[in-house]
Image (cartoon, helix red, strand yellow):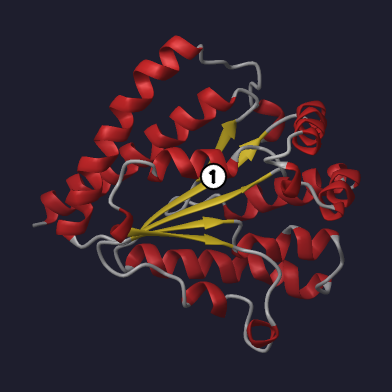
Amino acid sequence: MLDKIDLSIKLCEKDYNSQLPDIQLRLVRLQQQIHQAQIPVIIMYEGWDASGKGGSIMRITEKIDPRGYHVWPIGVPTDIELAHHYLWRFWTRMPAKGEIAIFDRSWYGRVLVERVDKLTPPDLWERAYSEINNFEKTLVENGAVMIKFWMHISKDEQLKRFKEREADPYKFWKITPDDWDDRAKWDEYVVAAEEMFKNTDTHHSPWHIIAAECKRYARVETCKIVAARLQKALDAKGSAA
């Protein structure tokens, strides 16, 4: 699936500056309607390091009511979390009805970093595909909107962004030795990601692979997808009423 993504797609600054405020205003209105309709929303980000996950999340949340959403940055599990099933720490962060939960990294770490870094035996991460599908299906059947993003950039673009971050006094903290270690395993991550898409791109919870080489395009595109999915959920609930 990744080979099919056109990374040359761009959005000029003029179009970005005209489109972003319009879509953000739409998100403000949709958030209020989602709250009134009591629909829980789950937005989940995976993708390459430095692919723009944080920038996209910022544009989605920038104008909406901060009382109605929570962003969960997902890192290494704590000792308490490791004592439970790997999905436990995500169940405890699911949104209430009418709220939005945004995950910066997610339960897909089971079949990505845990697989590539050999932190989990093959029989367990292979079993995780069905566990994750059932987990997401349960949430969707209970009324949640599930939106899954993979932010995609080229290996060359990632190197460029890594070097820019290292030289930026405001962003140098974003680069760690782990990022460089993961970059060295790029090909292994491609294999893991492709198998992940193959096994978890479902009707109830499809993947949206975003061409993120142009940050402006990626930010507007993710906002548009979120708005479209929220509108679809509201229309469906209205039809069922």
Residue at point 71%, 43% (across, down): 48
Q: Is residue 77 left or right of residue 218?
A: right
Residue 114's place in the image compared with 21, above or below, is below
The residue nearer to you, when weighing 5 against 57, is: 57
Out of 189 and 78, give the one closest to the viewer.
78
Which kind of residue does numbered mark 1 sit on?
A: Phe
* 111 over 15 or under it: above or below: below
Query: Which quadrant is the C terminus positioned in?
Result: bottom left
Q: Is residue 126 above or below residue 15?
A: below
Query: Residue 137 sits in which quadrant?
Result: bottom left
Q: Mark 1 = which residue?
A: 149
Residue at figure coordinates x 80%, y 38% from the top left: 166
Report x, y in % for residue 168: 74, 34
In this view, 224 is above or below 216: below
Question: Going 38% across and 26% down the picture, which residue do you hit?
Answer: 20
Residue 3 on image: x %, y %: 72, 29
